[in-house]
Image: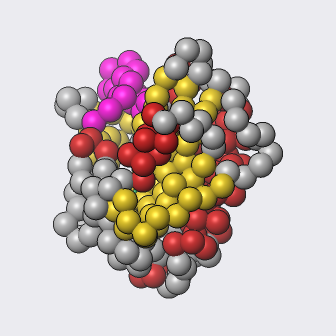
Amino acid sequence: MNGSIGVLPDIIWYDSVGSTNDEAQARIAADKLDRVWIAAARQTRGKGRLGRHWISEPGNLYASLTWPTNAPLKRLASLSLVAGLAVRDAVLQAGVSGQVQLKWPNDVLVDGRKVTGILIETTSGTGSHIAIIGCGLNLAHHPSDTRWPATNLAACNISIDPREMLGKLRAAMHARLRQWADGAGLSGIQDDWMNAALGRGGRLLVEGGKQGVFSGLSDDGALELTLDDGSLWTHHAGDVDWLEHRVST
Ligand code: BTN
């Protein structure tokens, strides 16, 4: 493992890359296994979750952290909760006054509208893993044609440039990764996440047709639903419909 947990990772800035996640992956493939933030003013092939495209014009923040970890494989997926909390912390530290919530798996919402997206990819070696935590933060603009309504920080009266925002995100992510402690601190992360969750205790419909009450998070970061017959359903991936929390675009 390279680098002490006490030291904030360096930042490498690019004017333009295909995807900061892909750039991070290329570093790992070249055996550069340090903790580092790869950031870019724009991306030409920005990647979203579920194979979607992430529009990446200048003005917003596009950044990916490479994070080698000794966490057991079964704990890696919980990094999604860690990253969501860290991005929420950074958004709050930027001075947003609206309600800042987390929407499973890891979207950050301001007054119900999405301001960020997170894409985590992992590479596994013998006994250790490297996570790439990719974060997109809408600082100056947002797409208008999204499935869930979006916004940006400027529209929330927060004017902040990508470099300053990355400074806040770097500190916040570091603090949350220390709390997570390679998975040993997961229960505190789960509690903090649920305290900021959209729709806790509300009804959800998940891809595949199951409907129930959002009752918790599993140890691998999956969403737990209590179905009407009292049984527990664990939803790992795919779209979710928050039946009581629809915001118009
Ligand atoms: C989502 O679909 O909500 C996740 C979007 C993640 C976008 C970020 S921008 C920085 C990093 N590089 C990418 O190509 N994607 C992530």
Q: Quadrant of the N terminus?
A: top right
Residue 162 spot, x, y in % from top left: 52, 72
Please state which of residues 86 and 40 is positioned toward the viewer in this rendering.
40
Would residue 236 be counted in the magenta stretch?
yes
In the rendered image, residue 249, in percent from the top left (x then y), is placed at 24, 70
Where is residue 16? Give x, y as percent. Answer: 38, 65
Question: In the shown orientation, is residue 210 left or right of residue 42?
Answer: left
Residue furthest top in the image? 126
214 w.r.t. 48: above or below: above
Which range is magenta?
Answer: 222-238
Residue 179 appears in view:
no
Give the number of marks.
0
Residue 71 lies in quadrant = top right
Q: Horizontally, is 80 left or right of 54 in the view?
A: right
Residue appearing at x 67%, y 51% in the figure: 9
Residue 137 as seen in the image, left or right of residue 91 = left
**Residue 162 appearing in the image:** yes
Residue 116 or residue 209, whichever sits in front? 116
Question: In this view of the protein, which residue sits in the foreground, 198 or 95?
Answer: 95
In percent of width and height, residue 38 lies at 51, 55
Whether residue 227 appears in magenta in the rendering, the answer is: yes
Colour scheme:
secondary structure
